[in-house]
Image (tube, coloured by chain):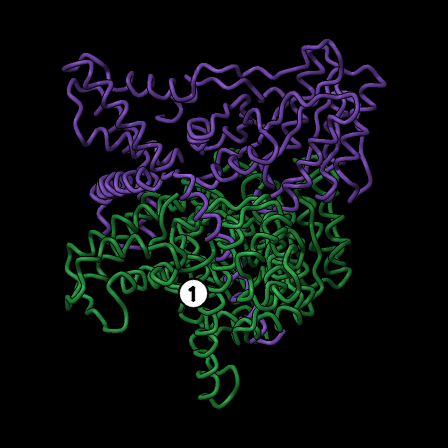
Chain colours: A purple, B green
Amino acid sequence: MTPEAAVGLVVVAIAVLAVVALLAWRSRRKQGSAPARRTEAAARDAARVADRVVDRVAERAPTAAAGPSLRDRLGKARAALAGSLASALDRPSISEEAWTSVTEALIRADVGLTTSSEIVSAARARVEAGGDGQVDAMAALRAELRDRLGRVDRSLARRDDGAHPSVWLFVGVNGTGKTTTIGKLAKREADGGTDVVLAAGDTFRAAAADQLAMWAERSSAHIVRGAAGADPASVVFDAVESAAARGAELVLADTAGRFHTEQNLMAELQKVRRVAEKGSGVVTETLLVLDATTGQNGLAQARQFIEAVDVTGVVLTKLDGSAKGGIVVSVQTELGVPVKLVGVGEAIADLVPFDAAEFTDALFA
Amino acid sequence: MFDTLTSRFETVFSRLRGKGRLSEQDVDAALAEIRVALLEADVNLDVVANLTARIRRRAVGEELSGALNPAQQVVKIVLAELTSSLGGEQLVLSYAPKPPTVVLLAGLQGTGKTTNAAKLAQWFLRRGRSPLLVGADLQRPAAVEQLRTLGERAGVPVFSHPRSPVKAASAALAEAARTGRDVVIVDTAGRLAIDAEMMDQVRRISKAVRPHYTFLVVDSTVGQDAVNSARAFHDTLGIDGVILTKLDGDARGGAALSVKEVVGRPIAFASVGEKLEDFEPFHPDRLASRILGMGDVETLIDKAEAAFEAEQAEEAASRLLEGTFTFDDFLSTMQQVLGMGNLRSLLGMMPGLPQEMRGADIDEGRIGRITGMIHSMTPAERAEPDIIDASRRQRIAAGSGCRPADVKALVDQFKQMRSAMRGLGGLAGKRRASSPKPGAARAGRKGRRSAGGRTTPKGPAPVSKAPLALPGLEKGDWPGLN
């Protein structure tokens, strides 16, 4: 392709996109929704909070020498934070600095700048409402996080019409642990006396079906697989029908990892979900698998998957590492989808129900 | 959710015009915005503190140049600092005098080690080497099968050992010598940095094969924890370089900055898609503007190239610059733009776009309505929208199930875009005419092409000023926005 053509492509694309975007923007303005104000205030807030937190970090570890010394400081910073957090929050009157430490801890846990500062101001309000030293800061934070994470139903739904099978569909970006989660869950459900069928709907990644087949063996679940590159919707459909024929109660459907930005792949996923209900099955859970190491992009992932396939819950994997998985706080507060399961290790038993209190404690540990 | 850094700076600096130098207060005001941008891009807090201190030193007292406004100037400083933080020293791969050259890949679970082992193998293959892939991941079920399938696809043999990852790795060296393979790429199991037993295992693998290069595979969606795992892997293995994966999503990839600061070794490769070919040397300047959320014209160009029919687009582009762009061109371009991926993420990559429009809600229904309106036009109307009067508008509206006002909005917007583009075309044409060779106006581009190993310099008279601003499309020029 000639250079002129390449430039041309982009100019044309930008021009056309601009027209479409402008039309969209105008019509939104006409409908009178104006979230811009709030955003501006939130942006100012965030900038102020970032300012304070970063200043504090910089103070604690003067940035005299750049380079290798940073590596050593990182470890110390974490330890120092844990120490200062505990002592600061124990004192009867809580200083500005202590609240900044809390914000810092939340940011380090990937809760995100905006959500962190919201949580801290809400906790402060609770303490202040309680009068001098009446409300313990840590208790206020816990209460705030508990409210945000909510007392929601975290059980995994099955059909309540007495018919079978129920389908649980697993979705997410690449490498979050969908196949492994299904493997563990299959074992758990099978041990609980449920007849489980696995659908090897990841027909894209090399050997994904083999991986699932090994899990199926471990849990003696039945597996339905298609050829490599087969239509994932048809594999899931076959699995549902096979489950119905065998009288199995539950189908766990794997899907290929896909980025939420790939429109075609998201459309494919919508088709999988549709087709899963075409025969005898009903999709009772669509679970988004999120990796605990994921940062702020997790929110964008959740938003797009929710929009595409109506996600009912989150599985937070790899929580046994040093990552805290704080992004799920934002996912639940902003998008209203709760965490239902947590992966805390490689063993089959290491998939456990989410516990909001434990999770909150770990955020500050 | 937030505005781009540039337009946020515009607000910060709106009172500053006419000053000679950036004062400390001016810079501090801008730094607050920079911190937010960096934190939202998942740059580690400690690294943010470090970086902003460096940026501050660099920016305070900087003389304001006449060419750029203060906001643009600070953005330029920030971009330069991020680019040099991400780049700096290049990793030059040299081959062992006594083959094979051994490369070890390590990282957390799910970062893409196996896939990138195969991508790296193909990269070596294309450079005339004969690589051997080694499956030393016996932890994850079927990981070796996955590697075999990928190896087959790349045309690279795969070696493994059914029980011991350490034996697999060490026996692979003999196998390579026996079969005349000169590069050995060892894929290891994903492991948590705090898992002592598994970290010991990878240390033993490393001891057994004594790799010439050890690459840490880092997922670009990773958050604040990136520094902890990077440090642990670096302490255990001594990392020589980083492979940054999953850049095909819309994660800002700030973790790369964190990892770079911790490990102090170059980011060697970037994985930008699911195909084996979607693997390229890393471009620090691209990631720097991506981290700041400033738009990414380079990625946009790449995506456009993949999605567009070259000839057709070339014609459409020249008609656009000449001002004879038709609704038919518009329609076919729109279809191709849709093939480039999620529209919202595409909008995010566009430089100089006001924030309101970045967040614009473009759904399929809207695209469908626009398509419908254009389909309801006669060929003459599509070629020359000026002839669309009230009665024609009525007919088009009826034909597409829209309101006449919608038709008017589309036609007006289209005409405005066309005349803005015609101005741009005149500009580009003049520049081209004044230079000795066609396309010499591309000089403003950074040296990405040479680094990227592409032989055709592509590039942009009209977009060369990006990502600071797209000429002719600056905020004030968006009709109906100000």
Q: Nearer the viewer, residue A181 or A164?
A: A164
Which amino acid type corresponds to the residue marked 1 in the rendered image?
A: Glu
**Residue at the (36%, 52%) spot, across then down:** B4
**Residue at the (68%, 11%) spot, across then down:** A192
- Specify the farthest residue to the bottom: B436
Question: Relative to residue B170, is residue A320 drawn left or right?
Answer: left
> In the figure, residue B120 lies in which quadrant?
bottom right
Question: Relative to residue B258, is residue A306 drawn left or right?
Answer: right
Q: Is residue B316 above or below residue B433?
A: above
Q: Quadrant of the C terminus of chain A?
A: top left
Q: Secondary structure at mark 1?
A: loop
**Residue at the (61%, 68%) spot, across then down:** B383
Q: Which chain does the numbered disc 1 sit on?
A: B
Q: Position of residue B35 (x, y in %)?
A: 30, 47
Identify the residue position indicated by label 1 in the image. B89
Note whether residue B318 is visible: yes
Q: Nearer the viewer, residue A14 or B289?
A: A14
Question: Relative to residue B236, is residue A66 drawn left or right?
Answer: left
